[in-house]
Structures are given as C-alpha cells and as structure tokens.
Amino acid sequence: MSDGKPARPTMEDVARHAGVSQMTVSRVMSSKGYISEKVRDKVLAAARDIGYVQNRLARGLRSEQTPLIAVVLPTLGNTVFTDVLSGITDALTQNGYRPVFGLTEYSETREETLVRDLLSWRPSGIVLTGLEHSETTRQAIRASGVRVAEIMDVDGPAMECAFGLSQKAAGQHTARHLLGKGHRRFAYAGSQNGQDLRAVKRLEGFRQTLRDAGAVMISEDVSTAPSSMVEGRRLTADILSRADQPDAIYYASDDLAAGGLMHCLSNGIDVPGTLALAGFNGLPFLNALPLQLTTVETPRYEIGLQAGRFLVSDQAQEALPDGCVDLGFTLIPGQTC
C-alpha cells in the first residue's frame, strides 16, 4: 500500500530517460568501466532531471532509510552554526539518530552538490539553512521523499517546516532602537559578498525602517571575505576614511561589529558619543569586549534542537500557516549606542 510519498527514481528510470541501458547507468554511477564523456554527461543530466541519487549503502539493506540526518550548513567559521549543530546533535542522539553534515560556504552550487551527495546515503531527514534553494536542490529532495527542516529564517514559505526567526524584523527592530537613540546617518558593513541571504533580509528591514523615519543610509560596504573581526576592523576603517561620516554603523554580524569596536578604541573614536555600533547574533565572546556591544541575540541552540526533534518525531509540529516556527529574537541594548 502506498504511504502517499512519491516513488524514488531508480537506475531503470534514469536509463529510460537517458535512452541507454541500465548497465550503462550502473557503470556511470560506480565509475567502473569505459564510458564516453558524451554518454556520461547524458546519464548524469538524466539523473538530475528526474531527481535520482545513488544509494551508496549496501543494496541488501531491508530499509531504504538509515538512522542518519543530513545537515547542510553554510559555515562553522564562528559559533553561530556550531550552536545550531549542537542543538541538532542533542535532539538526534536522544532518539537514536546521528548527523552527517557538510558546508556550502554560502554557495548555491555547492549546496546542490552537497544535497545530492548526502541524499545518496539515504538519510531519514535533511536540515537545510535558509528558505532559498535552487530548483535542482528542491527536486532532489522531493524525489527522495525525506522529511526536511529549514533553519534560521521564517520570512517565506517552507518546503515542509522551518525553524528560526524573522530576519527582516530583526533588522527593523535594530533600526528602531538606533533611531530612538537619536541617530540619523547610517552605514552598513557586511561580508560573504552578499551571499548570506539572511543578512540581506536584515538589511532590507533595516533600510525600510530608516526610509520610513526619514533617516539616511550613506554607505553600504559588503566584503567578499568571510565574516571576522579582522574584516570588521578593515571595513570600519574604510567607512570612516571618507568625508561623508555616519553616526552609526550596522554590522551583519557580531564579529564584524567587534572588529569595528576595536578599530574605534585603537584610534580614539568615542563610542557611542561620536559613533554608535550594533551587531547581530549575541555571541558569547562579546562578554570579553571592553564595551558591551548592542546586538540581537538569536536562539541558535533551540533552533537546532527543534529542527532535529521535528525530523525524528512522528508528531506534527505546530507551525504558522506557511510552515514556519518563529522562535523570535531578543535585542540586547549595550554600551555602543
């Protein structure tokens, strides 16, 4: 009896779609035997078209799924996603599952490749970061039939269920706080070449609130480098080297903001008297800074914990109409604005 899930594409389906024999498909997938590049490309294209992913586990297994949960994260370069991964891992180990994960470094192409690779291990579920994914990624997940939890964002419809916070609202809330302190001229400092789509949404919310209040965003500097204190210090120096000066800088992350604070303290710039600073995430290392940074604290561990529990539970998750679970955020007023 069918359980309502779509049947997974097979090698036979790939062979039919590509117009080749099943043996040829097997050779391409196992990389054994001579296959011309033309035929190989044809088979791989057919596999992508129908969402087929190779099962690398022993073919004699009775079940098509394993006690694995695939986790796709953008980076482990700071504690944002290590906290999320800790929550996921705790939820899974309590239920006899374990995570297998990979990093995209904020690349959509890498996400496509990674998702297909992880699905080949026949996990019972998959965690994706954010709500924006290519149609290739979506097709592979749909064809696999696995449960999917998206994390860190609720600003849009989920594939199945998402756990996170409204990034746009976080940007709006920070802007209102800075405006309430009397600031009117703003700069923005970001990283990752704008590929962090959650940061993009926060910036959109921040911009919108400034426009509504008649305030001015005089500059937006987005580095191609990963987020770090060193990059935050460099970006801040660039912003403050110009004739048109802001009275507040909004940073895409806490490490960028902490680097900005170090630049100001090293150069005798009065914070917050001359320049206000605000970050995002509420990372623990901020407690070691000379001044408490104004930031937005995010429930990173709880996001991971709830996403993990959702994937291994048979119970329905109480979600918003668009399939999202909003876990909120907390603005932490500091000494930098």
Image (cartoon, helix red, strand yellow):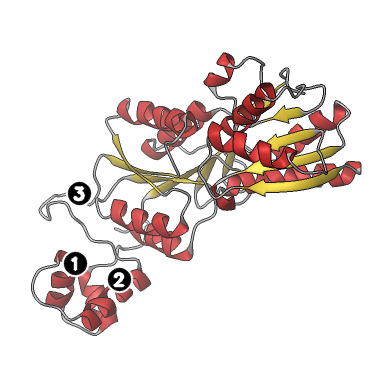
User: Given the image, on which type of amino acid does mark 1 rest?
Assistant: Met
Quadrant location of residue 144?
A: bottom left
First in sequence: mark 3 vs mark 1: 1
Nearest to the observer: residue 215 or residue 12 = 215
Quadrant location of residue 84?
A: top left
Q: Which mark is residue 63?
A: 3
Horizontally, is 115 left or right of 299 in the view? Answer: left
Horizontally, is 45 left or right of 184 in the view? Answer: left
Q: Is residue 166 visible?
A: no
Where residue 142 appears, as percent x and y from the top left, is 41, 59
- Secondary-structure class at tag 3: loop
Q: Are marks 1 and 2 in contact (CB under 8 Å)?
A: yes
Nearest to the observer: residue 215 or residue 270 = 270
Nearest to the observer: residue 334 or residue 70 = 334
Tell me if residue 37 comes above or below residue 113 in the rendering.
below
Q: Residues within 10 Å of mark 3 (few under 14, many from 20)?
A: few
User: Given the image, on which type of amino acid does mark 3 rest?
Assistant: Ser
> CA–CA distance between discs 3 and 2?
22 Å
Q: Residue 29 carries which label?
A: 1
Q: Residue 47 carries which label?
A: 2
- Secondary-structure class at tag 2: helix
Q: Which mark is residue 195?
A: none
Quadrant location, the N terminus: bottom left
First in sequence: mark 3 vs mark 2: 2
User: Residue shown at 22%/52% (left/top)?
Assistant: 64
Q: Do the residues labelled 3 and 2 touch (CB within 8 Å)?
A: no
> CA–CA distance between discs 1 and 2?
10 Å
Where residue 139 appears, as percent x and y from the top left, is 42, 63
User: Residue shown at 30%/66% (left/top)?
Assistant: 52
User: Residue shown at 10%/77% (left/top)?
Assistant: 34
User: Given the image, on which type of amino acid does mark 2 rest?
Assistant: Ala
